[in-house]
Amino acid sequence: MRLLLVTPENRFIKAFRRGQFNNFVQLTMPYLAGFVPRRHEVALVDEYNEPLDVDAKADLVALTCNTPNAAHVYALADAFRARGRLVVLGGPHATLLPEEAKAHADAVVVGEAETSWPRLLRDAEQGTVEPFYREPEPPALDGLPFARRDLIRGRAPLQDTIIATRGCPHRCAYCNLRQIYDPKIRFRPVEDVAAEVRTFRSPFFTFWDDQLFMNRRYALRLFDAIAGAGRRWAAMVTLASTQDETLLRAASRAGCVCLFLGLESFSPESLRLANKAFNVVGSYREGVERIHRFGMTVQAGIVFGFDGDGEDVFERTLREAAAAGLDGATVSILTPFPKTPVWEQLRAQGRLLTEDWSYYNGKTAVAFRPARMSPERLWDGYQWFRRRFFSPSCILERVRRSGVRPLQSAFLNWGYHRALGNRIPGRPIPRRSLVLGSSGPAGTGR
Ligand code: B12
Ligand code: SF4
């Protein structure tokens, strides 16, 4: 069979990310390509940097579908099906709303796919695919094939991403992890991970695990195993797990140069409402300093729009982010992803503004009515924060105060600064409210 695997990227996110420097490759489709028997022909198109030709010859087209990309993926899937291709969808959104996805696909793979994807491929070869595929058991993560990075084009410095674990012990109210993965936490053998890391061509890579430090013993063994690989890397962890200095030292020795902390908010009330009270605001500064002492920078996730956020949240966050000594941040608007507790709550309260999934990307639109401000105020405040936080003076001040890896930090922050000027394509305002802010109709230089 000829397979075409697609990493889709909708025009809003594409326009938003242009100019940023840390646009790492999405692992999903190169990883799934690793499961395809070599008798089949496989092509991979990543819409981040390649045009997708819907007339491309293929027996089977497989696309991964998250919520921000859902509308775009459905349009692509419809176009491929209109040309007689067998279309398979999987990924977070297809897992959350499989019936919706099925209207655009011949088969939907629900949830994890380590055994169901190979089964689907065998069925497709016989010409008899089922409408839905699900894993009978949570798949084990030993002996996994390595991702097919040879299929990635034009992304050399940022093409190396990997996972070592699956799952997270927490239950943040806005997060989809509990709905898309089996709750059983699993680990790859550290030897497998180290062997895959040794195949990397770039000197830098990223762990895409949700909480790499969640199991101390495993993390220490992993760091030991990859220490000799001579690569620098970044990972996502919780602040609470970084209190352990032995872990930080081992991570640093193994090449860790940056930790992404999902701090999300500086408001204890908002964190409580997000079921994330394990982030203790009073410990942020001390926690960041501890990580800095081991030579690693801190990139924080910051989200605006929780029910505890009033109109002053933007200014307060700017002040407190500086006081905490963050090196950088990924800033988002709270987004009620389907089936999360936040989505259930907002839906029950009639606060969802639209079900057009292209508004659900956390970056270029507001999809709900906030509790303590208007959607317009949320949009404007988010934009104001980004402009200030990534202004040259704020960047310089951050880099100077931290003193940790100043070139790396300045470079990453400068990418976010460059992206501030990006123009996002326009589109109609959702039916139930104005959500696009006072800066005028969509597309006016947001
Ligand atoms: C890495 C990552 C990112 C990276 C990289 C994104 C990228 N370009 O790759 C960054 C940090 C940039 C990012 C950004 C965002 N992300 Co993100 N991200 C992840 C993360 C942590 C890991 C994904 C991953 O690579 N997993 C490893 C691969 C191998 O597994 P997988 O993708 O889960 O796929 C498995 C199954 O789902 C299935 N499968 C998946 N697709 C398909 C397709 C087919 C055909 C088949 C057969 C099977 C299949 O098979 C795989 C093996 O079992 C996930 C959380 C998670 N653990 O999944 C969130 C996650 C995917 N992200 C999420 C979100 C919300 C975002 C943002 C919108 C956040 C924001 N506000 O900015 C943006 C939007 C990005 C975009 N391009 O639109 C949500 C998506 C929720 C949803 N309903 O869609 C998740 C689930 C996080 C969460 N906790 O809720 N993200
Ligand atoms: S810590 Fe991160 S991955 Fe875990 S539940 Fe919370 S948001 Fe999701």
Image (cartoon, grey):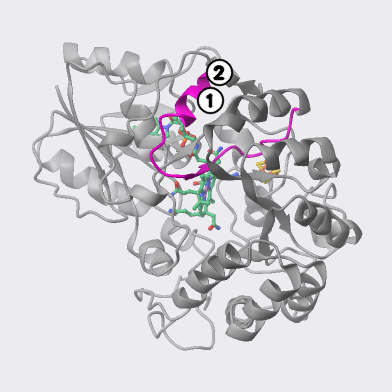
- Quadrant housing the N terminus: top left
Mark 1 and mark 2 in contact? Answer it, CB < 8 Å: yes
Location of mark 1 (residue):
194
Q: Looking at the image, which is closer to me, 310 or 388?
A: 388
Q: On the rendered structure, is 181 left or right of 303?
A: left
Q: Which numbered dot is residue 284? A: none
Q: Is residue 179 magenta?
A: no
Task: Say if 299 sits above or below 304 in the image.
Answer: above
> Which residue is pictured at 24% across the width and 43% down the height?
77
Quarter of the image holding residue 38? top left
Task: Say if 155 sits above or below 189 in the image.
Answer: below
Circle 2 packing at 10 Å, graded few (<14), some (14-19), many (20+), is some
Q: Residue 261: image x %, image y %?
A: 70, 52
Q: Amino acid at mark 1?
A: Ala
Q: On the rendered structure, is 120 left or right of 277?
A: left
Q: Residue 217: image x %, image y %?
A: 76, 23
Q: Find ligand 2 in the image and state its quadrant.
A: top right
Q: Which numbered dot is residue 191? A: 2
